[in-house]
Image (tube, coloured by chain):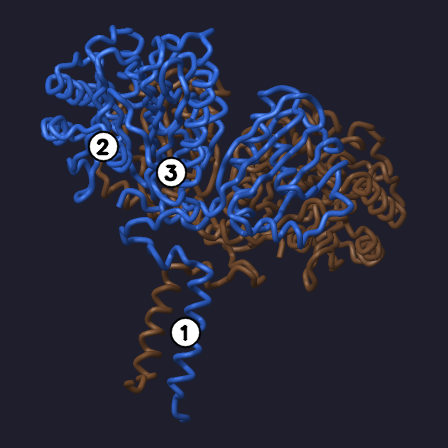
Chain colours: A blue, B brown
Amino acid sequence: MAKTDWKAEAKALKKKLVRLRAATPVADAAGPKVKAPNPVSPLAPAGFPDLPVIAGVEFAAAEAAVRYANRTDVMLVRLAPGTAVAGAFTRSSTRAACVLDCQAKLAERVPAGAGAAIIVNSGNANAFTGSAGAKAVDAVTGAVGLALGIPASRVFSSSTGVIGEPLPHDRIAAKIDELAASLSPGAIGMAARAIMTTDTFPKGASAVVQGEGGEIRIAGIAKGSGMIAPDMATMLVYIFTDARVAPGLLQKMLSRNVDDTFNAITVDSDTSTSDALILAATGQSLAAEITARGPVAKAFEAALHGVMTDLAQQVVRDGEGATKFVEIRVTRAVTPQDAHRVAMSIANSPLVKTAIAGQDPNWGRIVAAVGKSGAEADRDRLSIRFGDILVAEKGWRAPDYSEAEAAAYMRKSDLVISVDLGLGRASRTVWTCDLTHRYIDINADYRS
Amino acid sequence: MAKTDWKAEAKALKKKLVRLRAATPVADAAGPKVKAPNPVSPLAPAGFPDLPVIAGVEFAAAEAAVRYANRTDVMLVRLAPGTAVAGAFTRSSTRAACVLDCQAKLAERVPAGAGAAIIVNSGNANAFTGSAGAKAVDAVTGAVGLALGIPASRVFSSSTGVIGEPLPHDRIAAKIDELAASLSPGAIGMAARAIMTTDTFPKGASAVVQGEGGEIRIAGIAKGSGMIAPDMATMLVYIFTDARVAPGLLQKMLSRNVDDTFNAITVDSDTSTSDALILAATGQSLAAEITARGPVAKAFEAALHGVMTDLAQQVVRDGEGATKFVEIRVTRAVTPQDAHRVAMSIANSPLVKTAIAGQDPNWGRIVAAVGKSGAEADRDRLSIRFGDILVAEKGWRAPDYSEAEAAAYMRKSDLVISVDLGLGRASRTVWTCDLTHRYIDINADYRS
């Protein structure tokens, strides 16, 4: 028998290993049964942004071990007396106890005089937990009210994490005094971290608007990564401003900007039971009150829209397993509903999303997604573009289309796919990400 | 510098390689840029069934190199004079030229006297190929009509494979004489193989019904594995019978059995541009004609339904990357539409499908899928079962629920998930599969 050349053998093995790792970086990093911190999304911004202090808002975070040890998992926000609060929530028919509670409290229209508070935990969604779920919400919001001297009807709560497990509300209640004692106007970054679940980075955005007689500031945070196909609101989002604005107008401005921001994103077509978006305006800016027809309303609403868009896009950038951020632009649809239907049909198609993951300009799958959407479409009038590259028109591949050029474009991390239906005047832009092995890794073993 | 111990190095590398391969068997087997035959689905039946010969039907298959070499990729079926033909097709608004052509020909109601033929190719869908697509259909069906002496208006065609590439119809036409010369009543298995694309096994099913004065036989074949969420029809399915039955009644029987067979399956929520189902009845059985109120109609329709269900389920069992076959039963919904919506919302949820792949009894995701479906549902009245295990009821986990027992159940390859909505009397059963790494492997690199 010939003597083994161990050096050659080692080199050959090494080559195989490198090749295999390159093909499946994910499984190597996390493996199926090992709980390791998720690496930060390649689409993440450079860092958490510097957010302006919002007068009248204080934050605190604590470790309550709701599900995991050694991480902050509860955030508390205190809002000064006079703060107007608006909200938008999931329309899921199985929504969580805390969502039902927030909706009921906002409908009550309790005067803002006493101030308000927001308490949020990660690790457990307190969803589908029967009557115990409502009792847990009462216990937590009651404890916050007591500690801060605020009526429980002005304490809003959210829970995010596993569905169907009883919320260990006593562990959260036990931390309220510690949280109350550490409230600080500058701790918004800590708050953003405490509400993360499968998120790989904390999400923040801000804007400053020139009001009458002073600046108006807006700062928001969000969490969300999987189970992202919001319906009416989104994951968890908290936006704060020092603007002086009546609750009714605040709610209107929030509601009419949800559709083309948070309702225009999708990671996996799955809608959460716990989606909640709360917007709080403390009124502590020196600027005059914003009124519906006043000179600042438009600028303020545009700035709010910008913050909402920024946070919504960050959620997609942290989509579970995402390696590509994809904007889908649909134009010239017959109705806005058709435009939305086509955009979401493309954005949610597993075949489109896996092709993008494979950097394959497989435009045939986009044609199929348009076709299945149920929207009015005419094969011979639609055109498809990857970035500026015209791919298909008049019912066929464009005459100058170059597969090599399209393939080069697909290697970018930020992509724009445009579909012009050529039929009407309605348009819609939505954002999504690709579907990769890591999505499966994360979700085939979420609970262990 | 110390001398490298290459033997130890090689051994360490080998260990790593083995571990990595175990964690990612798929990527290792297929790799991203290597085209290898897909291993047969673990859910496949033991083998292709023995199908009865249907008098008046002959099959042939050939290698036309439509896209790949060294495989049969064209099948021809000749149907005897007097054969009644019925069909059901995709409702996609971007459907392929051959689908439009079949629909137009069936609408013409050309008398059956001259016989009929079916010509099918894999490798290229001839979809979104503009006016060239229609010309290619004419070229192929015209060549078949000429070779067999059948009017082109009775030659039906299907194409399946990549979208947007011109169909090399001359390569198919060049094989027609060879095909015509090798037609044989026993070659149905070869035909089933010739129409496969990403399928890992050929699909066949049959039934025999006692008619008045003789046996009536039914035999069908299907192809389908990905882009499976049929709408009105499915992938490609061809069913043959020697029954004597008028075209109108045949079409009625086909149409009313599509909804709870082919329209009740989904692999990935993506609807193809080319779905087609053709049912041909040669009338060559010795049994008397089947009439709407005759004694055999019910038994024949039940047998047809059985063959359709069997083929539909085989398509799911060959779902791209599937390791689990999952039956979703929804009961006591307010309307049939609601029952279907809830069943498909669960069957298409990436989070439910990845949990099943991970053998995780993550019923919270089923609750979320019910909630997002848009159907009427009451959290406190619905109940969920895995097989016979009651998981959740009355808005919470069932008191006797054992996670260990449920986890053991999830390790089976055939699963039943039941959701009782507790509201009305409508029910719906659909079939789906899990979402695994292999689905991503197959679809992130389909075209190369």
Q: Residues within 10 Å of mark 2 (few under 14, many from 20)?
A: some
Asked whether A2 or A147 is in front, the reply is A147
Residue pictured at 38% horizontal, 16% vertical = B423
Position of residue B266 measured from the top left corner of the image (x, y, whole percent): 52, 37
- The answer to whether the residue labelled 3 contacts the one labelled 1, judged by CB atoms less than 8 Å apart, is no
Type of the residue with mark 1: Lys
Type of the residue with mark 2: Glu
- The chain carrying label 3 is A
Find disc 1 in the rendering and name its residue.
Answer: A14
| Tag nearer the camera, 2 or 1 | 1
- The chain carrying label 2 is A
- The chain carrying label 1 is A
Find disc 2 in the rendering and name its residue.
Answer: A165
Judge whether residue B427 can be spotted in this image. no
Q: Residue B271 carries which label?
A: none
- From the image, which quarter does the N terminus of chain A lie in? bottom left
Which of the 4 quarters of the picture holds residue B391? top left
Asked whether A323 or B10 is in front, the reply is A323
User: Mark 3 to mark 1: distance in Å?
Assistant: 35 Å
Q: Please, what secondary structure does the residue beneath circle 3 have?
A: loop
User: Mark 2 to mark 1: distance in Å?
Assistant: 45 Å
Asked whether the residues under marks 3 and 2 belong to the same chain, the reply is: yes
Position of residue A105 in the picture relative to residue A213 (left or right): left
Q: From what the image shows, is residue B65 above or below residue B76?
A: below
Type of the residue with mark 3: Ser
Q: Please, what secondary structure does the residue beneath circle 1 have?
A: helix
Position of residue A379 measured from the top left corner of the image (x, y, whole percent): 72, 33
Residue pictured at 26% horizontal, 46% vertical = A448
Q: Residues within 10 Å of mark 1 (few under 14, many from 20)?
A: some
Find disc 3 in the rendering and name its residue.
Answer: A225
- The answer to whether the residue labelled 3 contacts the one labelled 2, judged by CB atoms less than 8 Å apart, is no
Position of residue B70 in the picture relative to residue A172 (left or right): right
